[in-house]
Amino acid sequence: MPNGKPGDSPYTDIVTHGRDIYSPAVDELIRELDSLGAAIDVHDVLSEYELDPDADVLEQLAADLRELKREYESGD
């Protein structure tokens, strides 16, 4: 059972433990979304993707996170 230690979750690895998991840009988007209070929604997005995605999948992950960020910033 996960208990918040490094390696339990890519989200907590990035946000809590400051690890680099996906790419600098994607990890920064995740940190920005966390600061906007989007933890649950980020978890939902990340659950749709495998760890260590190829470049095309990583770009789709980034696009999904950017869209989520736009939604949070616009208040929708």
Image (tube, rainbow, N blue to C red):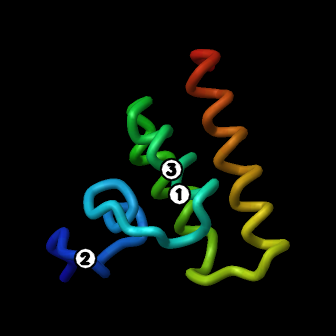
For badge 3, the amino acid type reads Ile
Q: Secondary structure at mark 3?
A: helix
Evaluate if marks 1 and 3 touch, with contact meaning CB atoms under 8 Å apart: yes
- Amino acid marked by disc 1: Asp
* Vertical relation: 10 (above or below) 1: above
Which residue bears the numbered disc 3?
A: 30
Q: Residue at position x 41%, y 41% from top?
A: 34
Residue visible at 59% across and 21% down? Answer: 73
| Quarter of the image that includes the C terminus | top right
Label 1 packing within 10 angstroms: few (<14), some (14-19), many (20+):
many
Residue 58 place in picture, x, y as percent: 73, 69
Mark 3 or mark 2: name the one nearer the start of the chain: 2
Q: Quadrant of residue 39?
A: top left
Q: Residues within 10 Å of mark 3 (few under 14, many from 20)?
A: many
Do the numbered discs 3 and 2 sit on residues whose CB atoms are within 8 Å? Answer: no
Q: Which label number is shown at residue 6?
A: 2
Instruction: From the viewer's side, name the closer residue of 14 and 36.
Output: 14
Q: Please, what is the three-letter code of the amino acid marked with disc 2?
A: Pro
State the mark number for residue 27: 1
Mark 1 and mark 3: Cα distance apart in space: 5 Å
Q: Tag 2, which secondary structure?
A: loop
Residue 45 x, y percent position in the rendering: 58, 57
**Quadrant (top left/top right/bottom left/bottom right) for the N terminus:** bottom left
Q: Is residue 43 left or right of residue 12?
A: right
Please report contact status of discs 2 and 1: CB closer than 8 Å, yes or no. Answer: no
